[in-house]
Structure formats: C-alpha cells, structure tokens
Amino acid sequence: MSALSLRLPESIHRHIKEIATKEGVSINQFISSAVSEKISALMTEDYLMARSQRAVKGDFNKILKKVPGRKPIAGDEL
C-alpha cells in the first residue's frame, strides 16, 4: 500500500468526514472506495466505447427484429 498526501478545500474535507462517519468507515476507506468507484466507471466507459466501435448496425437491427411485438408489462410503458 502507498501513502498519498492530498490537499482538499475545507468544505470537501468536512463533507468527506461527515459521510465517512455516517457510513461507519474511516476517511481513508471512504476516499479509497470513492476513487475505486470512479476508476471502475471510467474503465467501464472505455470498455463500452471500444465494444461499440466493433458493433455492426445491421446485425443489431436483425436482433431487434426478433423481439416479439407485445404490450409492455405494467410499469414499463415509459
């Protein structure tokens, strides 16, 4: 594990401290989790973008045509 010195505005530090306390974790655990979530989101975005570049629109349309034409389940109309 490595150490990181980080300067934050007082307001952000206060919010982090409040949320960490509410969640029952240390500030370090909270920040580590938050950074991990951000990394995961960015990596997922990159993965989906790369996958979309390989997509073939015609194949996608063929798959959509196989979807049965029926009314949506109640609550799914929107």
Image: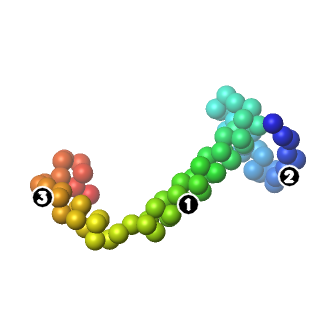
Instruction: Name which residue lies at 52% across and 58% down.
Output: 47
Instruction: Name which residue lies at 46% across and 61% down.
Output: 51
Instruction: Name which residue lies at 70% across and 38% down.
Output: 30
Instruction: Name which residue lies at 18% across and 63% down.
Output: 65
Instruction: Tell me the SS state at disc 3.
Output: loop
- Residue 4 spot, x, y in % from top left: 85, 45
Q: Amino acid at mark 1?
A: Asp
Instruction: Determine whether label 1 and label 2 are within 8 Å by CB.
Output: no
Instruction: Tell me the SS state at disc 1.
Output: helix
The answer, for residue 18, to whether it is visible in the render is no
Query: Which residue in the structure is indicated by mark 3?
Result: 69
Dividing the picture into quadrants, the one containing residue 44 is bottom right
Instruction: Tell me the SS state at disc 2.
Output: loop
Q: Residues within 10 Å of mark 2 (few under 14, many from 20)?
A: few
Q: Nearer the viewer, mark 3 or mark 2?
A: 3
Q: Is residue 26 left or right of residue 47?
A: right
Q: Earlier in the sequence, mark 1 or mark 2?
A: 2
Q: What label does residue 7 carry, if any? A: 2
Q: Nearer the viewer, mark 1 or mark 2?
A: 1
